[in-house]
Image: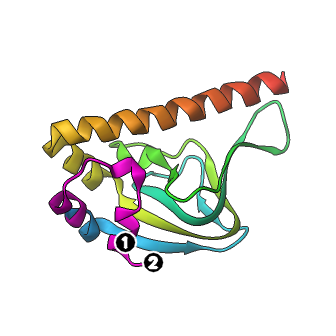
Amino acid sequence: MDKMAAIHSLELLEGLTEEQLSSLVTFTNVVECKKGEKLFKVGQSASQVYFLLQGKISVQVQLSSRPETVSLVVLGNPGQLVGWSGMFEGAHYTATGVCLEDSQLLAMEGRQFMSLLEAHPETGFAVMRRISFVISERMRNLQSVVLKTM
């Protein structure tokens, strides 16, 4: 899938103008992730935001109360946001993203994406509202996982 077609397919970006969507191409790449490969690791400096195009990604954490890693969420729907920490200045990934099968993702430079949203506050707010919903869902998943391990 070419970058522009991938960008157009992202429901999360609804409301951005054609010009704004076109500007995303300059700091976006399509990346491949093989089954078993780590897309990013907990503690790693976060600069990229990923959108799943195809495949399956497990977002995992290591709880201090357990020797094994625990999956917070398995993402398998095209367009799902992965690695949202990359949007924020000085951030580090708070989990590890592992490809459960060969996957294709759209990798976007997070700070440039955030700058675009800030430059267009009305549409930026709508996009950030959708992103905050994703973050909220992931936090609920984390809470559920933690409570099950106690």
Q: Which residue is mark 1?
A: 5
In contact (CB < 8 Å): disc 1 and disc 2: yes
Mark 1–mark 2 distance (CA, rounded to whole Å): 7 Å
Chosen colour scheme = rainbow
Residue shown at the point (19%, 55%) measured from the top left? 17
Residue shown at the point (61%, 45%) measured from the top left? 95
Relative side of 70 to 22, left or right: right
Residue shown at the point (84%, 21%) measured from the top left? 150
Rendered image: mark on residue 144: none
Relative image position of residue 68 (x, y in whole percent): 84, 45
| Number of numbered discs on residues | 2
Q: Which residue is mark 2?
A: 1
Q: Residue 71 colored magenta?
A: no
**98 w.r.t. 14: above or below:** below
Relative image position of residue 121 (x, y in whole percent): 17, 37
Hey, what amino acid is under mark 2?
Answer: Met
Relative side of 103 to 82, left or right: right
Magenta segment boundaries in residue numbering: 1-22
Relative side of 99 to 7, left or right: right
Please name the predominant secondary structure of the magenta segment in the image.
helix
Give neighbour class at mark 2: few <14, some 14-19, many 20+ (Cα, 10 Å): few
Residue shown at the point (32%, 43%) measured from the top left? 89
Q: Tag 2, which secondary structure?
A: loop
Decide which of 36, 8 is in the foreground and name it: 8
Decide which of 20, 138 is in the foreground and name it: 20
Q: Tag 1, which secondary structure?
A: helix
Decide which of 142, 16 is in the foreground and name it: 16
Q: Place residue 90 in its image quadrant.
A: top left
Q: If the image is split into quadrants, where does the N terminus sit?
A: bottom left
**93 w.r.t. 40: above or below:** above
